[in-house]
Structure formats: structure tokens, C-alpha cells
Amino acid sequence: MSRVVVTGAAGYLGPHVVTALLDRGHDVVAAVRPGSGAGLDPRAEVVEADLLAPDFDPAVWGALPHAVVHLAWKDGFRHNSSAHMSQLSAHFDLLTGLAERGVARIVALGTMHEVGYWEGAIEAATPTAPLSQYGIAKEALRRSLALAVPSTTSLAWARAYYIYGDDRRSESIFRKLLDAADEGRTVFPFTTGKNRYDFIRVEELGRQLAALADAEDVTGTLNCCSGTPVSLAEQVERFIADNHLGLSLEYGAFPDRAYDSPGVWGDATVIRDVMSRDESTAAHQ
């Protein structure tokens, strides 16, 4: 297989992408910030560097990779952090520079927050009106890369949705549920839980992104998701039961937020096709 660099490899999602790529037989370089590479799959080559620094040189990764999966992003769980816009140009310079050096495939992680408020399925062509600094920055990078990356580099922009699993390393409601159980609480204040979202396990998202690194014919914007909307109440109740947390939800303790869609999910047509290729290949081996 080929040499693949995963940026942000020590983040919440990164270790799962690294392992999925290694399982596909790739030579993987896990690019991490200094001092953050502990706990990664030992089969990966870990390289520490600040890749958004003005003097960063990709030569530190060794031989030119065939593909780069770009996950690196500061404050991904803090949607109105000033880091999103202040580091935007550095992300643009890094990825366009890699394309100019001859990287054949780039998979960049996007987010449903690029779209803003929407009801129903999000498709590649769904209009965007982001409502947070995070969404604005990601959307700006998505649009600018589409114009700047040369045709010699195959570029995919992979929009992620509601990720769960490996929850101790996240800042989601699932982490808060685990913390509440650790504290000995038995009741968890909650909204009505009626809103429906597209939930995906972090391990499955890692496998989807790894498969996209190989699917060089798949370009442009696509969704990495389950494609199936599930109510927040159903997902949380299932999480409590599966993890034996002993919590009961106090429905209606918090009001539903006016800016949350009653139901939003990703159109999973493209990613399902990509993953079905893997299943077909495995079946014939």
C-alpha cells in the first residue's frame, strides 16, 4: 500500500483513523503536536511538530506521502473559539503547499456546522450559512481549497456529524453522562430529547475516512455519517443502558434550544458506496 500522513493524529478522532489506515495495510505517519503522541497505535511512525507554524517543513515527515488525511484543528469542541479564524490561513497554506509538492490525495475533515440551521438531510449541494466561528472557518477552508488545489491532487472534503465513542476523550454529552455517574449522581437534567441527529461511532468514522484515503475517484464534498436520524433521547437512553450508568433523565429540566433543528442528518449515499466497495473487495479475497 502507500504512505499516508494523518495530521491531528493524537486528537479525539485521529487514533481511530491511524489504526484504520494501518489495518488497510498503509505505511502511516501520525503527525502530532510536541508531547502529544502517547497512546497511538504502535505500528504507526509518530512525528512531532507544529504543522501550523510559519516555518513548518513537511520534509520532517520523511518521504513525500501519497495521501494526507487532515484532521488537525484546535478547539474543535469550542465552537466560538478565536483559534478557528486565526489559524485558518495556516491550514490553507499547509494543504495547498502539500498539493504543490505532489501529494496525490488529500482528505480534509469538515463538519455539518458549515451548513448552519437546516431541517432534513444535508447533501453536498445544501446551501451553507454557518452560525459559529468553527463553522465559518471550516466553510471558508472548504471553499478556498476547492479553488486553489490543482487538479493533479484528488481532494475530498468529508463532513462529520455527531460523533460518539471513546467518550472519555470528548467533550460531548456522553462524556458528561460518564462524569455524572462517576460522581455518584442518579438523575441527569435533560432537554425534551426530541431533536433527531445523525450519530456515528468514532471507530466507524475512522474507517470511513481511511477508506476515503484510497477512494481517489471520490472528490468534492461528501458526508461521513450514518445517514440515519435518531432522537437525542433514544441515543442517550441507549448509552446509559449500554454503559450501566444508573442514571435517569430529568426530561424538560432544560429548554430545547431555539437554534437546534428538530431533525438534521447527512445524506450517506456516497460514503455507503465507498464502504460497499470495501465489502465487495473483501468478499472476493
Image (tube, rainbow, N blue to C red):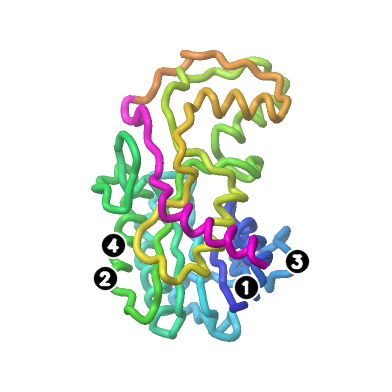
Judged left or right of residue 124, residue 108 is: right
Q: Given the image, on which type of amino acid does mark 2 rest? A: Leu
Q: Residues within 10 Å of mark 1 (few under 14, many from 20)?
A: many
Q: Secondary structure at mark 1?
A: strand
- Which numbered disc, 1 or 2, marks the residue that appears first in the sequence? 1
Residue, x 31% and y 34% (percent of image)? 119
- How far apart are the alpha carbons under marks 1 and 3? 11 Å
User: Residue 42's mark?
Assistant: 3
Q: Given the image, on which type of amino acid does mark 1 rest? A: Val
Q: Given the image, on which type of amino acid does mark 4 rest? A: Arg
Residue, x 53% and y 56% (percent of image)? 276
What is the magenta range? Answer: 258-285
Where, by quadrant of the figure, is residue 183 drawn? Answer: top right
The front one of 145 and 74 is: 145
The front one of 11 and 285 is: 285
Q: Which residue is mark 2?
A: 147
- How far apart are the alpha carbons under marks 4 and 3? 36 Å
- Is 271 colored magenta in this rendering? yes
- How far apart are the alpha carbons under marks 1 and 4? 27 Å
- Return the x and y of residue 47 as percentages of the image width and height: 64, 73
- Return the x and y of residue 19 as percentages of the image width and height: 67, 61
Q: Residues within 10 Å of mark 3 (few under 14, many from 20)?
A: few
Q: Which residue is mark 1?
A: 29
Q: Which residue is mark 4?
A: 143
- Residue 223 vs 215, above or below: the answer is above
Where, by quadrant of the figure, is residue 206 drawn? Answer: bottom right
- How far apart are the alpha carbons under marks 2 and 4? 7 Å
- Which numbered disc, 4 or 3, marks the residue that appears first in the sequence? 3
Image quadrant holding the N terminus, namely: bottom right
Image quadrant holding the C terminus, namely: bottom right
Q: Are marks 1 and 2 in contact (CB under 8 Å)?
A: no
